[in-house]
Each structure stands twice: as structure tokens, then as C-alpha cells.
Image (cartoon, helix red, strand yellow):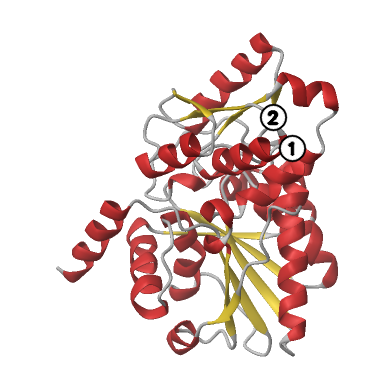
Amino acid sequence: MSSVRRTPLVRCAALEAATDAGPVFLKLECLQRTGSFKLRGATEAIASLPAAEREAGVVTASAGNHGAGLALAGGAAGVAVTVVVPERTPQNKQQRMLGLGAELLVQGKDYDASEAIARDLASKRGATFVSAFDDENVIRGNGGSLGEEIRQQIEALGFTLGTVLAPVGGGGLIGGLANELSPREVTVVGCQPTNNCAMHDSLALGRALCEYEKLHTVAEGCEGAVCERTYSIVAKHGIEIVTVSEESILDAVRFLYRECGVVAETSAGVPVAALRTKVARCDPASATVIVISGGNIDDSALDSLLAEGDN
């Protein structure tokens, strides 16, 4: 995956001081090319396409980051990429996808509606639909490569990896992390907004909620249903999913900016909120790593968020 960067892993004294988690590190996927971990899975998916499917192009649905990753990976491989995004997708994410050469269609009131449109479009065009999470290659590229990288970096620093916290939407990231790290006795904790938490609710019901509609969340990248594939991985490994409030997510984004010097989008704030509010428990005797999944927050949205915190 040559287009994928090995992103920094940095220790976060501010979070250590604010919690009882022991050594805490941030895995800065916000510094990944395209500004999100999603490039990992997108690159793996494009690389795995047979020649005939490359020629026909791909279609996807995305809240923004997967689409950007697929556009970059597709452009490098000469594969045409069409992305269907929900109507409430931030403008900065839309512009990034367009700038990377994607055909962009803004259709659907939420992610699930956009996915239905994208699947139908792929069928009509004879193109390949590449899911943001329900795809073996995406799961392996997103979480598998990231989990291995985290483990290697922590070991190189002389620490024992105990816990990894990551945001959860459809489950492509947490599924890959679980497959990579759970067999190595690392605790993987998935974090979701209470307003929209399909994986959490699926585990509570004992079945995958492949159709799901709840409240909107400020962490739009975490919205939407899960699939049988990701649910099965999470259930198999006994992954705990915790939830956090909307205000705690916004507070986490402010905290990352002011105390850590990290610009993070709202979905990336979810696992930080889980640690700060102590709904996610970590072993203080080993290292905790938080995946800062993306940094694609609109400048005006960040300015407003910071101003609100000053009031």
C-alpha cells in the first residue's frame, strides 16, 4: 500500500493527567494522506480489483473520508471513482473528493439512503460497488494494517500495548483492529455516539442491525447501520462498545485542539470522549492508544465549536 503513510504515534501527557489510564498515545491518522485512516482500506480494495472491474470503475457511498480515499487510490491506479454522499456531508469533504478526481453525487438524507442509491447506480453501470465497511479488503486495509502498525510502534518505544480505542460507524475499522489485535491479547474498545450507535445496539439485541435509523449525531462519520460481516467479527472477539454524549464529543475536539495541538474531526473525538468521561476503562499498567481517525473538519465548523466552548 505505497500511497499509505506510516502515521505518527505520539504520547499525550494531557490525557494522562486527565485520566487514570496510564501511558496514553494518539495514533494520528488525521495526518494520513486524505486526512483519514480510510485511505488504508480504499487502497487495499482498489489493489484487489481484477482487471475487468478496474476498467468498469467503482461506485461507493461515503460520509466523506472513504470516498476521498477511494478517489486517491483509484486515481493512482487509473480507476474511475463515483461517490454518493448524504446531503449533510460537510462542504470541505465534498471539495476534497472532487479535487481528487471523483465524480460526486450528493443524494440521500443519510448514509444508508446514499448507500442504497450507490448500489443501484453500480448495478445499472456494471461497475463494482466498494463498501466503506462491508468488504474484506477494506476491513483488512483499514484496521488490520493500522493495528499492526500501532503494535510495532508501541513495542519500539518499549511499552506493552494494552488497549486500543477507536470510533465505530459501520465497523470496518473496529473489525480490522479486532482481527489483528484481539488474538494478541490486546483489548479493543469501540466508541460510538449515544445518538447513533448501531453496533452497540446490535450487540445488545444479539443480531446485526443492517437497517438502522436513529438520531443524527455531530459525529456524522459514525452514523448508519452495520453489516453481518462486521457485526460477526465484533461479536466473535467479544469487543466492548461504549457510547458517549454529543457534548462530550464536542468537548473532546476542543480538548485535542487546545491541549494536544491536534485538529480532529468530530468522529475522531468520540474515543477521546470515551476516555475522558471514563466510560472506557484501560489498564494503567500498559499503554493505551487512541485512534485519531481523521482531521477533516471544516474551518468554520472548528471556529464555531471553539467559540462555543469559550461561552
Compared across the picture, whether 57 is left or right of 105 comes to right
Which secondary structure, mark 2? Answer: loop
Residue beneath the point at 74% across and 37% down: 46
Mark 2 and mark 1 in contact? Answer it, CB < 8 Å. Answer: yes
Residue type (three-letter) at the residue carrying disc 2: Val
* Residue 260 place in picture, x, y as percent: 42, 78
Residue type (three-letter) at the residue carrying disc 1: Ile
User: Is the residue 148 above or below the residue 231 in the image?
Assistant: below
Point out the residue furthest to the top here: 124
The C terminus sits in image quarter: bottom left
Mark on residue 79? 2
Q: Earlier in the sequence, mark 2 or mark 1?
A: 1
| Residue pointed to by mark 1 | 46
Compared across the picture, whether 85 is left or right of 159 comes to left
Instruction: Indicate the quadrant where residue 58 lies.
Output: top right
| Label 2 CA crowd tier, 10 Å (few <14, some 14–19, many 20+) | many
* Residue 310 place in picture, x, y as percent: 18, 70
Relative depth, front residue between 274 and 52: 52
User: Is the residue 180 above or below the residue 102 in the image?
Assistant: below
* Residue 181 place in picture, x, y as percent: 78, 66
| Mark 2 to mark 1 CA distance (whole Å) | 8 Å
User: Is the residue 264 above or below the residue 276 in the image?
Assistant: above
| Label 1 CA crowd tier, 10 Å (few <14, some 14–19, many 20+) | many
Instruction: Indicate the quadrant where residue 25 lies.
Output: bottom right
